[in-house]
Image (cartoon, rainbow, N blue to C red):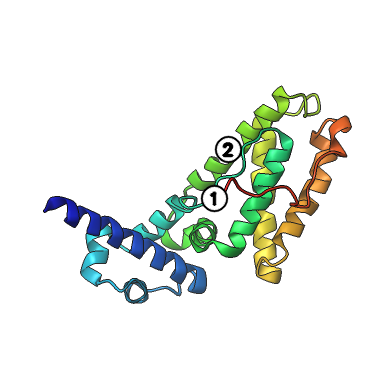
Amino acid sequence: MARPQQDRAVKTRAALVRAAAEEFDLHGYSGTSTTKIVKRASSTMGALYFHFDSKDDLARAVMAEQAADLPELAPGSGLQHLIDLTLALARELQRNVLFRAGVQLAVEQGAFGLQDDAAYQLWISNFKDELIAAQALGELRAGVDPASFARVLVGSYSGTQLLSQISSGRTDLPERIAELWSYFLPAVAAPEIIDGLDVTGSTPESAG
């Protein structure tokens, strides 16, 4: 009998995280209450506090799990694969509520007493790996450091998506990310490959 109870607990927790993401996305951290989360999840306050110590704890869970259901990008490596990844993330910010709420909470985290750069470090690491692969393929200019540019790219991406959120509700985010690359590529890409790189998002966005 233990297994069905464990399965229910896993489903209940997932429902609470999803409901919290939807509420945080709609109302922000300050405008969201545990009552609203429980109602949206069709759960109970007891279940919420069984899985989470507080609303702060639930917000941390949304931040930590923001990338849990992102689709896989089609296999590849090098600068084009990194460009495709950043454009795919832009599209996910438009339509994926868990990812969008996690990113939003990373910005708002001071409101619940958190100073945690783990989500940013995750993307810095992912982007660095892509850049190391590009470097091995001879696609980077001499002197470009993958770790350094990964930090610059994540910082620039974060600011671009935030501006897009404020100015257009992220409707223009893919175009703004393409614009970002149009300025970065002359500085980081080997000149002979720039014309062959596509920043419009016309390449396949995922493996599935």
The outermost residue toward the left is: 1
In percent of width and height, residue 67 lies at 49, 50
In the rendered image, the vertical position of residue 149 relative to residue 59, given as above or below: above
Q: Residue at x 77, y 29 (%)?
A: 140
Query: What percent of the width, then of the height, locates residue 32?
Result: 42, 73
As helix, strand or loop, the secondary structure at mark 2 comes to helix
In front: label 1 or label 2: 1
Q: Is residue 161 left or right of residue 24?
A: right
Q: Residue drawn at (45%, 50%), measured in percent from left and top?
A: 68
N-term-proximal mark, 1 vs 2? 1
CA distance separating discs 1 and 2: 15 Å
Which residue corresponds to the image point at 73% horizontal and 53% vertical from the top-left? 177
Relative to 82, say whether 159 is above or below: below
Q: Quadrant of residue 13?
A: bottom left
Q: Nearer the viewer, residue 188 or 96?
A: 96
Q: Is residue 69 left or right of residue 193?
A: left
Q: What is the x, y in percent for residue 64?
A: 43, 50
How busy is the neighbourhood of tag 1: few (under 14 within 10 Å), some, or many (20 plus)? some
Which numbered marker is on residue 126? 2
Name the residue rendered at 81%, 41% in the picture: 197
Q: Nearer the viewer, residue 89 or 59?
A: 89
- Local packing at callout 2 (Cα closer than 10 Å; few below 14, some 14-19, many 20+) is some
Mark 2: amino acid: Asn
SS class of the residue under badge 1?
loop
Q: Is residue 121 visible?
A: yes
Where is mark 1, residue-wise?
Answer: 71
Is residue 29 visible from the viewing direction of this image? Answer: no
**Residue type for callout 1:** Pro
